[in-house]
Image: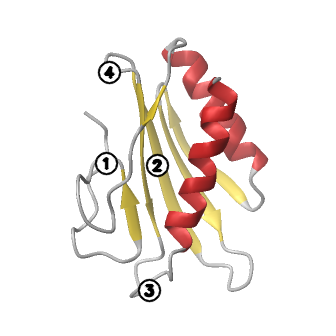
Amino acid sequence: MPRFDACDAASMKCVSTLNDSGYPAFEPVPFSCSAEDAMAAVKAVVADHPRTKVVEEDGLYLSTVFMTRVIRWKDTVQFEVDPDAKLIHFRSESVPYAGSDLGANRKRMTAVTQMLQARLG
């Protein structure tokens, strides 16, 4: 089970693969390679994004900060590779004081998911 929790079901500023319904719900990214190669793909996608910083890295877990372009808010994005289920889980949340991120997390994580799928084949 990932080290992070699902988003609050009523949240309009958070998306997660641990939610199964509502705005926050997002599908995890499947992979067929090794868990280590899947994590390498996650790291490469994060490195390819501008204004990102790795905060914590521990085996198959990665905690990052994505800074928004205009306002420079720091959004937290956590990833964890599940080697048994062969899935990459994530949780992306806009800064705590934002009531809504106007879809920024969903848009970013859609792009991240597509980049991961491309790297994973």
Q: CA distance from mark 3 to mark 4?
A: 33 Å
Placement of 69 over or under 84, stated as above or below: below
Query: Mark 3 near mark 4, Cβ–Cβ under 8 Å?
Result: no
Mark 1 — residue? Answer: 4
Quarter of the image where the N terminus is located: top left
Residue 98's label in the rendered image is 3
Query: Mark 1 near mark 2, Cβ–Cβ under 8 Å?
Result: yes
Residue positioned 55% across, 13% down in the render? 33
Q: Which amino acid, mark 1?
A: Phe
Mark 4 — residue? Answer: 85
Residue 64's label in the rendered image is none
N-terminal of the pair, mark 3 or mark 1, is 1
Colour scheme in use: secondary structure
N-terminal of the pair, mark 1 or mark 2, is 1
Quarter of the image where the C terminus is located: top right
Residue positioned 31% across, 48% down in the render? 4
Picture coordinates of residue 61 (x, y %)? 46, 34
> Most extreme residue toward the top, as rendered?
34
